[in-house]
Image (tube, rainbow, N blue to C red):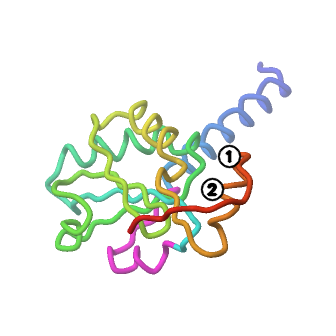
């Protein structure tokens, strides 16, 4: 006869494992490339995984690798199976693209979970800063400790 407390603990562990696995699998949302354009607000960083619907074993393997690290990435991820639109962002499938707002960053490393995680960690913040009238003084002077002075801007 088994201990009821032990059975309860085993059920909770299995439920926790199932919930974690389900969350990792369902974190990617299937959309078309056209829908992807509408889902990328200016300030949000998201991942898009471009793949084929069928006949691509490397796509399935790469998708599994990506799903294995999704919970640790903490980022919205979209699965795009729209072949004709993929060429706008990548030259092959499978392909992983990080979007900083409307700016794409193509992943060019091995299709492995640890490499995906490193790519996301390294590129989470955009490397190009867009200056405008509202941000220029703060980003160029206040951030560097410089005082207000004359600036030469070359276009």
**Which residue is under mark 1?**
144
User: From the viewer's perspective, is 32 left or right of 132?
Assistant: left
- Along the viewing direction, whichever of 147 and 1 lies nearer the viewer: 147
- Picture coordinates of residue 150, whole percent (x, y): 62, 62
Rendered image quadrant of residue 41 = bottom right
Q: Position of residue 128 (x, y in %)?
A: 47, 55
Residue lying farthest right?
5
Residue 95: image location, x then y, percent: 27, 52
Residue shown at the point (23%, 66%) measured from the top left: 86
Residue 148's place in the image compared with 144, above or below, is: below
Dots 1, 2 in contact, CB < 8 A: yes
Pointer 1 local density, CA inside 10 Å: few below 14, some 14–19, many at least 20: few
Looking at the picture, tell me which residue is in the foreground, 136 or 7: 136
Residue occupying image coordinates x 41% and y 39%: 116
Q: Quadrant of the C terminus?
A: bottom left
Residue in the picture at 27% in, 47% down: 60
Secondary structure, mark 2, is: helix
Magenta residues, as a range? 27-40
- Magenta highlight on residue 81: no
Q: Quadrant of residue 138?
A: bottom right
Query: Which residue, given by chain and number where applicable, does mark 2 sit on?
Result: 140
Residue at 58% across, 67% down: 43
Label 2: how many residues lie within 10 Å, few (<14), some (14-19) or many (20+)?
A: some
Q: Is 22 drawn above or below residue 17 in the view shown?
A: below
Which sits in the foreground, 72 or 40?
40
């Amino acid at each position: 006869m088994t201990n009821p407390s032990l059975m309860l603990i085993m059920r909770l562990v299995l439920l926790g494992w199932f919930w974690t696995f389900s969350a990792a699998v369902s974190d990617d949302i299937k959309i078309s490339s056209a829908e992807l354009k509408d889902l990328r607000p200016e300030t949000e960083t998201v991942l898009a995984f471009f793949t084929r619907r069928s006949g691509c074993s490397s796509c399935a393997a790469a998708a599994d690798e990506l799903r294995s690290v999704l919970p640790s990435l903490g980022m919205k991820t979209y699965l795009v199976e729209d072949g004709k639109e993929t060429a706008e962002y990548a030259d092959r499938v499978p392909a992983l693209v990080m979007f900083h707002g409307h700016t794409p960053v193509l992943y060019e490393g091995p299709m492995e979970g640890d490499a995906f995680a490193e790519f996301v960690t390294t590129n989470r913040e955009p490397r190009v800063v867009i200056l405008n009238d509202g941000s220029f003084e703060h980003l160029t002077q206040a951030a560097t400790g410089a005082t207000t002075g004359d600036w030469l801007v070359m276009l």
